[in-house]
Image (cartoon, rainbow, N blue to C red):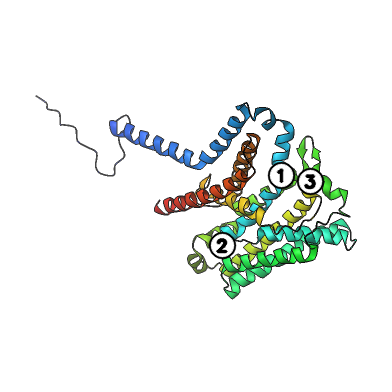
């Protein structure tokens, strides 16, 4: 008579047999993990879609919110903010906050307006002067932080304050409105096939920044420096040079944002640029909790900008008072900081 050996458990570490109960449990666990990862990576995007649908169906806001005029104005108004946020990405990828980008944007706008209005020079010269001004400010900041060792919080905030005072001193608190070429203001006010021109320019800048940060050696090294500067130095990367270049990129993009700001407003104001900093900072911090968790990214920043823009626009159309926008931006900034910290801790544990 033959006997049948009793079933034995598989050895520790062995893969479960196909079709077994252990295999089913493993598949279920992987499915739950995958669903959780998808929710973590795309939760903010789903929230943006939900908010858009909500404001589109509410009777108080539906007709105005989904109108072509409102959609065009919404995306056009956020184009400059998106470029300012992209300027923030490069130093943040290297591990630094650059609080000067708003002031550099405002000052570059004044530089461009002054070149064409007060000096009477051609528009291309004004554009080059504005972008070059931003580049020089970024170069100076990068040298102070990377080679002199000045605290980046103090240096960038100090430069922002200095530029704000210089703007007010030059303009006397007044706008520069005369002599702004229509070729520039048309970029900020007109559309191509229903799409605002300034949106197309911002989209091109965003695509270029995404390609640099995600597809080039420079971008990979930038993230490596921000993750662990000491280890990156041991691998032979010139860390200080990368830190310097991150601020140069930031200043150059902020200078470009200044040109777009002049194109959108049609005038250079005496604003110090701090009002542009906090929404951009919020969007960049929100980018670290979407798609590529723990890392600032261009796609995540676009989602963050849309989240802020749709929320504020919808609340305004619902009749919320004017101060709600500032309160929302401040609350979103605090929430973004908290979630970014949690995301970084979770990534570190993994």
Q: CA distance from mark 2 to mark 1?
A: 27 Å
Left or right of residue 216: residue 179: right
Label 1 CA crowd tier, 10 Å (few <14, some 14–19, many 20+): some
Vertical position of residue 44 compared to residue 117: above or below: above
Q: Position of residue 241 (x, y in %)?
A: 61, 68
Element class at badge 3:
helix
Of the pair 70 and 17, the residue shown nearer to us: 70
Give the residue at x 86% y 56%: 123
Q: CA distance from mark 2 to mark 3?
A: 31 Å
Q: Nearer the viewer, mark 2 or mark 3?
A: 3
Element class at badge 2:
loop
Of the pair 275 and 218, the residue shown nearer to us: 275
Q: Quadrant of residue 306?
A: top right
Give the residue at x 71% y 44%: 77
User: Mark 3 vs mark 1: which is more N-terminal?
Assistant: 1
Q: Residue furthest left?
A: 1
In the rendered image, is residue 162 in sight? yes
Of the pair 318 and 111, the residue shown nearer to us: 318
Q: Nearer the viewer, mark 2 or mark 1?
A: 1
Element class at badge 1:
helix
Of the pair 9 and 292, the residue shown nearer to us: 292
Q: Which residue is mark 2?
A: 96
Q: Position of residue 94 (x, y in %)?
A: 56, 61
Q: CA distance from mark 3 to mark 1?
A: 9 Å
Q: Which residue is mark 1?
A: 77
In contact (CB < 8 Å): disc 2 and disc 3: no
User: Mark 2 vs mark 3: which is more N-terminal?
Assistant: 2
Q: Which residue is mark 3?
A: 188
């Amino acid at each position: 008579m033959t006997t049948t050996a009793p079933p034995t458990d598989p050895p520790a570490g062995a893969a479960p047999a196909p079709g077994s109960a252990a295999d089913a449990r493993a598949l279920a666990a992987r499915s739950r993990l995958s669903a959780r990862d998808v929710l973590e990576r795309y939760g903010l995007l789903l929230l943006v879609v939900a908010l858009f649908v909500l404001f589109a169906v509410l009777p108080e806001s539906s007709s105005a919110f989904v109108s072509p005029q409102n959609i065009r104005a919404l995306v056009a108004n956020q184009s400059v903010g998106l470029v300012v946020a992209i300027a923030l990405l490069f130093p943040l990828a290297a591990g630094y906050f650059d609080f000067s980008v708003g002031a550099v944007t405002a000052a570059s706008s004044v530089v461009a307006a002054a070149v064409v209005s007060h000096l009477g020079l051609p528009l291309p010269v004004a554009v080059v002067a504005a972008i070059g001004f931003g580049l020089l400010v970024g170069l100076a900041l990068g040298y102070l932080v990377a080679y002199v060792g000045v605290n980046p919080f103090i240096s960038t905030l100090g430069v922002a304050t200095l530029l704000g005072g210089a703007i007010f001193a030059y303009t006397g608190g007044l706008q520069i409105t005369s002599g702004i070429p229509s070729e520039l203001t048309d970029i900020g006010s007109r559309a191509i096939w229903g799409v605002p021109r300034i949106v197309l320019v911002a989209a091109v800048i965003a695509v270029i920044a995404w390609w640099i940060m995600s597809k080039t050696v420079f971008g990979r090294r930038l993230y490596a420096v921000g993750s662990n500067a000491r280890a990156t130095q041991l691998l032979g990367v010139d860390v200080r040079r990368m830190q310097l270049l991150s601020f140069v990129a930031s200043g150059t993009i902020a200078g470009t944002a200044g040109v777009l700001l002049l194109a959108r407003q049609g005038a250079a104001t005496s604003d110090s640029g701090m009002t542009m900093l906090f929404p951009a900072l919020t969007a960049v911090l929100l980018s670290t909790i979407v798609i590529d968790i723990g890392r600032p990214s261009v796609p995540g920043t676009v989602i963050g900008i849309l989240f802020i823009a749709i929320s504020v626009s919808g609340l305004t159309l619902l009749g919320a008072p004017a101060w709600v926008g500032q309160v929302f931006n401040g609350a979103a900034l605090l929430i973004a900081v908290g979630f970014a910290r949690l995301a970084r801790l979770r990534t570190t544990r993994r």
